[in-house]
Image (cartoon, rainbow, N blue to C red):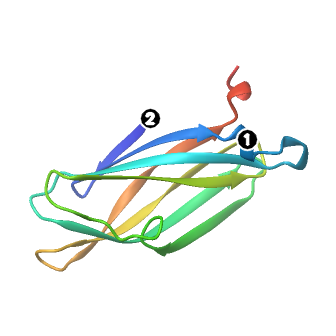
Amino acid sequence: MTSLISEGVKVSVETFYQSDYSNPLQSEYMFAYRITLENHNSFPVKLHRRHWYIFDSNGTHREVEGEGVVGVQPIMLPGESYQYVSGCNLRTELGKMHGIYQMENLHSKQMFDVSIPTFEMIVPMKKN
């Protein structure tokens, strides 16, 4: 698991290779990732947007951005957490991602960015 605290929000990431949804002969590798967000601030926060930077080991990269996460814009009170699972497809057996969540302090109405730590996606047999 990879974790990072920025702007009072802790972001933790776990990754899982999805062999049933992958096709190595066609250079298709599917990974799931579980994100846990924890609000360590003294004010409630709302996640508005996400911006991902995705890198394959063949040198290609892409960006994905949009509103919320998995179709929602969660609100977390102080001390609360929110968890979701999503996925990413790669063309190679290993890659990495990182990004930014745009959040709002619901007391001051100020927007701020929370860093998503870099995490790797590696087909298990490649770890040996």
Q: Nearer the viewer, residue 119 or 37?
A: 37
Residue visible at 58% across and 47% down in the picture: 32
Question: Circle 1 sits in a helix, a strand or a loop, which is it?
Answer: helix
Q: Give me the C-alpha separation between circle 2 and circle 1.
A: 22 Å
Residue 61 spot, x, y in % from top left: 69, 60
Question: Is residue 107 left or right of 91 when viewed as pictured?
Answer: left
Badge 1 is on which residue? 20
Residue visible at 63% across and 46% down in the picture: 31
In which quadrant will I find the C terminus? top right
Q: Compared to 124, does 94 lie above or below?
A: below
Determine crowd level at label 1: few under 14, some 14-19, many 20+ residues with C-alpha closer than 10 A. few
Q: Nearer the viewer, residue 6 or 101?
A: 101
Q: Nearer the viewer, residue 64 or 24?
A: 24
Q: Nearer the viewer, residue 97 or 72?
A: 72
Residues at discs 2 and 1 in contact (Cβ within 8 Å):
no
- At label 1, the amino acid type is Asp
Q: Which numbered disc, 2 or 1, marks the residue closer to the eye?
A: 1
In which quadrant will I find the N terminus? top left
Residue 94 spot, x, y in % from top left: 70, 41
Residue visible at 63% across and 54% down in the picture: 88
Determine crowd level at label 2: few under 14, some 14-19, many 20+ residues with C-alpha closer than 10 A. few
Instruction: Give the number of the disc on residue 63.
Output: none
Residue 29 spot, x, y in % from top left: 74, 46
First in sequence, mark 2 or 1: give its number.
2
Instruction: Give the number of the disc on residue 1.
Output: 2
Question: Circle 2 sits in a helix, a strand or a loop, which is it?
Answer: loop
- At label 2, the amino acid type is Met
Residue 108 spot, x, y in % from top left: 12, 77
Q: Compared to 95, does 67 lie above or below?
A: below
Which quadrant holds residue 22?
A: top right
Which quadrant holds residue 115?
A: bottom left
